Image (cartoon, rainbow, N blue to C red):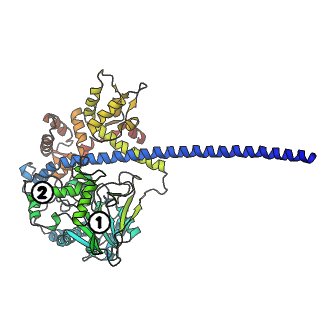
């Protein structure tokens, strides 16, 4: 009996402990589910913020390119009439402005006028170049040294000579177990190029490269990238190949930074000399000089009696021109399509309205092209991709983008492609970081989002008057408040960026308890950089909006790159510009403004300082840094 009681108590105790264990296990599972839900929710929100931030960057970039293309005729006109010694007086008269180096001056003679001082401790090049010279350049650039201007001119002269002798279409064989590495946009990011060489090896006869254009602009080391690539081109002309992108173009360089970089690093007029006039380039096209044609590289291998191809295209001529109708103009338009077009998932071929040039081509267009030319794969660049590459059109089209951190630190990876003898692509991704410790995802997304919203707010402020007018159309009673839908519609109608405005509302404008948007709150945290009392609000906003375009024009006029132009040049340029765009600003307003900023009354103004007065300042950031 006692034994039975003991057994009963033991069983009872076991039953109790079993239920406790079950409850604990159930709580653990519930906790795990809650943590999982929280994690998924947090990651989803971070991914949403990352995606809309990248959408903001890309939309603003494409809108900027639209402006560039729309003004390309005007820029070309300015180049043709303001950069050659015999034509300067056609528009402006400035006796004090130095003349640019004569086109007929032998480059060798000019090189001889540049002495290399004994104090120069950078690389000293001798031609023909060797691998040791290339290694010396890499070492110097890693240590932020500059190559002396004399050696730069010699390098450019030799590169020009070699490129002129090369065909427009180069066939690269992948037979004999040789691989080919294809790189995309670098955009002045030297660290990306150095990382590619570190991971993949330097160019050589056994390690061949194709660089798909867009070497320059945006980044701060475009010149160093060109010098390195040109050096290896001279050493291995059959193993390193350079295509041209839309940024290998003088007018694009004026807008996106390469011209300013060269001017800052090398104060030599010969390095900054613009190309010959459009009509001279047209004559060159007729004479079939290689440097005026699109460059294309095709790797091929014969398999089972068929030829498999992979091509990557480049471009040479600046978009937009007032040329008379002729075959050269038709060819120009074809090159424009090659330069600016992007693939998309929908069938057909439609104008690329986002960029303002080229077209969108669908899988059906790719299929027809491949069938006609017996192609296997198209590797192209020119388009930002968050992962550094993208495969589209059933694997037939690959976009490769090699500039990591393109918009902001942590915004994207870079990548390159390795092609084996069977032309099977292998992707290598990477991301350069300037931080000593790896930042977590929340920190990276926060940095990207903050930078994207800053750019968007500047865009909003530059269109302040138009936006207020658009808001007023929905604010019938003049309350200063409109619905979220109306606010979003007004934003898109003016800015045309195709952004998720309802999602972005909380970051851009305040909402009252009734759920209406205080539309003037879009501008609360923004103001003009250094207010000039002589500038009327409409004039100040116009100068703010077209600051980049005016900077290009002033750089064209500033032939000696001193940063100074005469008051007469400034006024006449402004009148030409406003006339071209149909901007209605009274001449007296700009004349008074120009006179007010000629501080030392010498008849010249520092246009960089002038334009700096019309950039947007974020009030909160200014308070934080003060």
Q: Of the numbered discs in the image, which one, if any, rests on residue 467?
A: none
Q: Residue 139, position in %: x, y?
A: 37, 69
The vertical placement of 272 against 491, above or below, is below
In the image, is 610 to the left or to the right of 513? left
Identify the residue at horizontal 22%, vertical 42% (top origin): 546
Residue named by callout 2: 330
Front residue of 464 and 270: 464
Mark whose residue sits in front, 1 or 2: 1
| Residue that extends furthest to the right in the rendered view of this protein | 1
Distance between the alpha carbons at the discs numbered 1 and 2: 27 Å
Is there any visible trace of residue 99 in the rendered image? Answer: no
Residue named by callout 1: 376
Q: Residue 210, position in %: x, y?
A: 29, 68
Quadrant of the rendered image containing residue 378: bottom left
- Mark 2, secondary structure of its residue: helix
The vertical placement of 513 against 218, above or below, is above
Front residue of 489 and 509: 489
Residue density around tag 1, few if under 14, some if 14–19, many if 20 or more, within 10 Å = some
Tags 1 and 2 touching, CB below 8 Å: no
Q: Residue 361, position in %: x, y?
A: 25, 54
Quadrant of the rendered image containing residue 538: top left
Identify the residue at horizontal 85%, vertical 45% (top origin): 8
In the image, is 378 to the left or to the right of 13? left
The quadrant of the rendering that contains the C terminus is top left
Front residue of 346 and 257: 346
Is there any visible trace of residue 132 in the rendered image? Answer: yes
Identify the residue at horizontal 29%, vertical 29% (top origin): 471
- Mark 1, secondary structure of its residue: loop
Residue density around tag 2, few if under 14, some if 14–19, many if 20 or more, within 10 Å = few
Number of labelled discs? Answer: 2
Identify the residue at horizontal 41%, vertical 24% (top origin): 514
């Amino acid at each position: 009996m006692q034994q039975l009681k003991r057994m009963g108590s033991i069983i009872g105790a076991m039953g109790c402990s079993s239920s406790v264990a079950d409850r604990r296990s159930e709580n653990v599972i519930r906790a795990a589910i809650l943590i999982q839900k929280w994690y998924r929710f947090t990651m989803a929100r971070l991914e949403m913020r990352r995606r809309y931030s990248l959408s903001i960057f890309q939309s603003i970039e494409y809108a900027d390119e639209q402006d560039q293309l729309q003004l390309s005729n005007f820029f070309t006109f300015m180049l043709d009439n303001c950069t050659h010694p015999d034509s300067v007086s056609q528009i402006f008269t400035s006796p004090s402005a130095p003349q640019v180096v004569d086109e007929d001056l032998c480059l060798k003679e000019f090189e001889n006028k540049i002495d290399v001082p004994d104090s120069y401790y950078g690389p000293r090049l001798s031609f023909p170049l060797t691998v040791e010279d290339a290694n010396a350049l890499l070492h110097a650039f890693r240590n932020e040294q500059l190559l002396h201007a004399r050696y730069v001119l010699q390098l450019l002269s030799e590169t020009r000579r070699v490129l002129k002798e090369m065909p427009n279409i180069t066939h690269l064989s992948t037979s004999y177990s040789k691989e080919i590495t294809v790189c995309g946009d670098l955009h002045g990011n030297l660290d990306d190029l150095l990382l590619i060489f570190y991971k993949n090896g330097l160019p050589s006869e056994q390690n061949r490269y194709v660089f798909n254009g867009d070497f320059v602009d945006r980044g701060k080391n475009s010149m160093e990238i060109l010098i390195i690539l040109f050096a290896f081109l001279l050493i291995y002309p059959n193993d390193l190949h350079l295509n041209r992108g839309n940024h290998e173009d003088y007018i694009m360089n004026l807008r996106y930074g390469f011209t300013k970089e060269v001017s800052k690093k090398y104060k030599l007029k010969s390095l900054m000399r613009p190309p010959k006039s459009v009509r001279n380039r047209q004559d060159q096209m007729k004479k079939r000089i290689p440097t005026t044609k699109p460059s294309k590289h095709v790797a091929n291998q014969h398999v089972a009696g068929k030829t498999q191809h992979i091509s990557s295209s480049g471009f040479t001529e600046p978009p937009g021109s007032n040329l008379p109708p002729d075959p050269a103009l038709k060819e120009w338009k074809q090159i424009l399509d090659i330069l600016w077009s992007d693939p998309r998932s929908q069938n057909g071929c439609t104008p690329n309205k986002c960029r303002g040039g080229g077209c969108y081509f669908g899988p059906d267009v790719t299929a027809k092209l491949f069938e006609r030319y017996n192609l296997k794969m198209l590797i192209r660049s020119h388009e930002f991709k968050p992962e550094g590459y993208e495969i589209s059109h059933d694997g037939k089209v690959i976009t490769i983008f090699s500039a990591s951190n393109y918009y902001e630190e942590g915004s994207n990876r870079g990548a390159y492609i390795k092609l084996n003898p069977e032309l099977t692509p292998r992707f290598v991704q990477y991301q350069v970081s300037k931080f000593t410790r790896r930042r977590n995802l929340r920190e990276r997304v926060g940095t990207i989002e903050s930078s994207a919203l800053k750019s968007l707010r500047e865009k909003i402020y530059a269109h302040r008057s138009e936006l207020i007018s658009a808001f007023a159309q929905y604010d019938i009673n003049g309350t200063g408040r409109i619905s979220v839908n109306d606010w979003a519609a007004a934003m898109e109608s003016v800015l045309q960026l195709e952004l998720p405005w309802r999602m972005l509302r909380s970051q851009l404008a305040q909402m009252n308890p009734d759920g209406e948007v205080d539309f003037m709150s879009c501008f609360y945290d923004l103001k003009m950089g250094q207010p000039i009392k002589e500038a009327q609000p409409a004039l100040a906003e116009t100068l703010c909006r077209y600051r980049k375009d005016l900077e290009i024009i002033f750089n064209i006029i500033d032939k000696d790159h001193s940063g100074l132009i005469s008051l007469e040049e400034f006024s006449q340029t402004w009148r030409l510009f406003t006339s071209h765009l149909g901007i209605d600003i009274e001449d007296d307003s700009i004349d008074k403004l120009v006179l007010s900023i000629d501080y030392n009354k010498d008849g010249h103004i520092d246009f960089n300082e002038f334009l700096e007065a019309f950039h947007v300042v974020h009030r909160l950031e200014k308070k934080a840094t003060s």
